[in-house]
Amino acid sequence: MKIDKAIFGVDDSYFLEFWPIQAKICKEILEIEPVLFFICDEESDFYYDGNGLVKKIKKVNDHITGNVVHTGLLACIARMYGTKYFPDEVCLTCDLDMLMINKEYFINQIKNIGDDNLVIYSSDAYDLNRLEAKKLFETEPFPFTQEMYNYPYNAAKGKVFNKILDTDCSFEDFVNRHGNYKPGYRYMWMIDEFYFSDCVNNKNHGIEVHKFKRGYTSPWIANRRIERHNFPVELEFEGEKENQKKFGIYDEEKLKNGYYIDVNCCRPYSKFKDAIDHLVDLVISPKEIKQVVIDERTELCSIMDKHKSDKASKPDWVNFGGHNYTRLYSQLFESLRDKEITIFELGIGSNNVLIPYNMGDMGTPGASLRGWKEYFTRAKIYGADIDKNTLFEEERIKTFYCDETSISDIKNLWLEIGEKMDIIIDDGLHEFKYNLFFLENSLDRLNSGGYYIIEDICESDLASWEKEIPKLRNKYKNFSFELISLAWTHNDNNLVLVRNNNIFSLGLKHNTDKVIHHRFDKIYDKFLSGLRETKVKLFEIGCGSDYASFNMWKEYFHNGQIFSMDINEEKVTDNGIVFKGDQNNEDDLQKMINLIGKCDIIIDDGSHVPEHQINTFNFLFDKMLKNGGTYIIEDIECNYWNPKNTIYGYEVGNHNVVDYFSTVPHKINSEFSGMRNNNLISSITYFKNCIILTKMDVEEIKEKDREYRFKEML
C-alpha cells in the first residue's frame, strides 16, 4: 500500500491556520498530496491554493431542526466523505492540527499491505480496558458501547472507504446518516468516529482490516506523541499546565532522530507560531550527512597502497580499519591530475606514540604526500605536522611545522608557503573543535574552484558538524559544504567536503556580469548544481567579454564539455570550443546542432533582441536540448525598451518574449487546460532578467497524453 492523498477537513475557524504548515509537512516529509475539504457557504470544484488541493463543501442543515449542523462536526465528517473523489488512490484521513512527522510510521510500515485493504493506525485509541475509555461511554450518549476507532489515522483507497461507509451519495445524505443511521444516533461530538467504527465492526463489507495498536497510557496519552502540554510555552488551561509539570517538554534530540510519530499542536497557531515553526524546522531541515557508496577501486587506491597510506584500504601496519577515501578523491580530482596545481595536507604521519593520533611505530611518515606526488604529475605538494621529526623535503614536496591548535602557527605556516592551494586536506587532529579552528583560519588560502577536505570525522563528532555546517554556509557564502559518510568497514569513515566553486565565486573570478551585475547565481545554482560533477554538455550563445562566461562554465563544469557561439570570437581549448556565428542566422544554428549534438543546458546570452530570443528558442529547444534539459534566456530587459532603440546593431522591435511565454503555464497543464504542449515544456521559472525553461524527461513524455481522471469536472 502506498499513500497518495492526505485528507483534511476544516471550517472557517482557527484550525484553518494550520493548513499551510500541515501541507508542507505532507509534501516534504511524507511525500503525499494534501487535500482540504473546506466547510463554508458555497460549493466549488477542486482548485490548488498554493498549499494543496482544496474543495469547498456547502454547510448542511439538521434534517430535524433545520439548523446548520455544527461546522466543526461537518469538517470531521467531510474527511471520510472526501475519499470518494479518489476511488483508485490510497487516502489517509488526518487531523489538521496533528502534524504527521514520521515517514517510517505512516508510510513505510504499510508498504507490504495490499492496496484493497483498510489500515487503522490507532485501533486502541478507545480501548475499553482503560478507565477513561470506559467512562467515556458511560458519560457520553453514544448509541451503544463498541470497539471504537478515531478518525486520524486510517488509510485505504477511496473505493474501499465507499464499500465500508457508503460514500457514493451527496454530502447532505452522508451527514444525515450520522444523525439517523440506527436508533440512538444523533449529531454529537465524535459521532463521525462512532459511525466509522460501527461500519467497520458490523457491516458485511468484505474488506480485510489491519488494526495497529499505537500504545496509550491513561489519561489519553498516545505513545511517541508530542502533546500540547509538551511544548515549551505558557499554557492557558490548568489541566494542561499540570500535565506540563508532570510530563515535561519534548526532547529535541529525539525529535531530530525520528522518535516522535506526530504532534498535537498548541492552538491557535497564530498564538504559538514561533514554537510550532521551531519544531517543524527541526523536523524538515535537511539532514546534513550524505551517504555515499563507491564500490570500485581506482588507480589512486593502488598508488596510496603502494606508499603505505591508509587512505585507500586497511593498512597492514596497525590494527585499524583504514579508509577508502581514494575512491571519492578519484572522482573529484581526475581532471586535475596533469594540471599545475598546489596541494596541502596537514598531518604527515608520526611514529611518536606520545603524539595524539599517531600512526604507531610501523606507520610510514609522508606516505600520503608521496602518493599525491605520483598521482598529480605536475603538482607542488606541501605538508605540515606537529612532529618535527617527520618533516622532509624532496622534489615537488615541501613540509613545515605547525600546531593545529595555535593561531600563530597557522598564520606562520601560510606565510611561509606563500601561495594559495587548489586542494587542502586536514588529516591532523581528528577532533571537531580543532578541525573547525584550522578550517576557519585556512579557508581564505583556498583558490577559487578548490577543495578543502577534513578527513576522519569520528562518529561522535557527526552531530556537531551537522549543527555547524548550516552556520558555515551562512558565514562563507562563496563556499559549499557537505558532510559525507563513505560506506566502509567501520563508522569513522566520514569527511567534510568544502568547495570554493559555486557560480558566485567563479563569476567574480572570471569577471562576468552574470554574477557581478545580474546575480543569476542566486537562481542558477538551484538548476545546475546537481550537474556539476557530471559529463554535462552546455551550449551558450555569447561567450562574454574576454570569454568570461565561457571560462566560468568550463571551471564550474570541470568534467563537462562547454561550447559557445559568438558573433565576434573563436577559441579552442581542452574542454571547450567557441564557434563564430550569428543566432539570427538559422544556418549557423543548424551548424551548431550538427557539430555539437544534443545538449543538457542551452543558454541564450546573445543579441538580447526579443525576436531573436523567440526564434532561437523555437529552433534549439526542440532540436538541440535533451529531454530533461534546461534552457535559459538571459537579459530579457530589452523586452521593456523602446522598440526603436538598437542593441548590437539590431532594432529591438515589437516582439516580446515575456508575453510570448505567457501561455506556457496553461500548456504545461495541458492535461487539464486542453492546450497542446508541443514543445514538451516541463516547467518555466521567471527570475529578474531571465527565463528558465526545462524540457520533459522520458517519464513526463509518457504521461503527457494520459486521460484526465476528473475530466467530468471540466
Image (tube, rainbow, N blue to C red):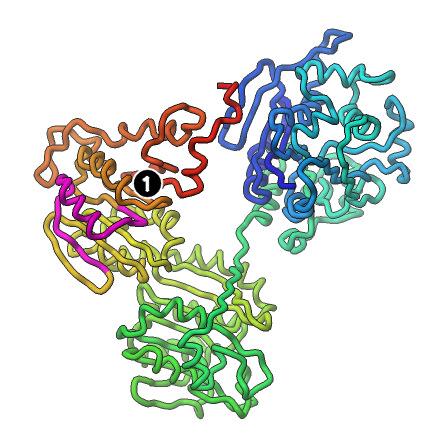
Q: Quadrant of residue 236?
A: top right
Q: Nearer the viewer, residue 595 or 562?
A: 595
Q: Amino acid at mark 1?
A: Ile
Query: Is 589 left, or right, of 124 in this rendering?
Result: left
Farthest left residue? 649
Q: Nearer the viewer, residue 529 or 284?
A: 529
Q: Work out whether 690 lies above or below 416.
A: above
The x, y position of residue 682, in whole percent, is 38, 37
The x, y position of residue 606, in whole percent, is 18, 44
Query: Is 315 left, or right, of 253 in this rendering?
Result: left
At 28% across and 50% down in the image, what residue appears?
Answer: 515
- The residue range painted magenta reads 576-602
Q: Is residue 587 found inside the magenta-colored segment of the image?
A: yes
At 40% across and 23% down in the image, what residue appears?
Answer: 674
At 30% across and 45% down in the image, what residue appears?
Answer: 625
Q: Is residue 666 found inside the magenta-colored segment of the image?
A: no
Q: Work out whether 113 lies above or below 442.
A: above
Query: Is 689 left, or right, of 248 in this rendering?
Result: left
Q: Nearer the viewer, residue 155 or 363?
A: 155
The x, y position of residue 473, in whole percent, is 44, 57
At 13% across and 44% down in the image, what residue appears?
Answer: 582
The x, y position of residue 283, in whole percent, is 60, 48
Q: Residues within 10 Å of mark 1 (few under 14, many from 20)?
A: some
Q: Quadrant of residue 107?
A: top right
Number of residue marks: 1
Q: Which residue is mark 1?
A: 692
Task: Please tell me whether mark 1 sits on a helix, a strand or a loop.
Answer: strand
Q: Which quadrant would the N terminus be assigned to in this image?
A: top right
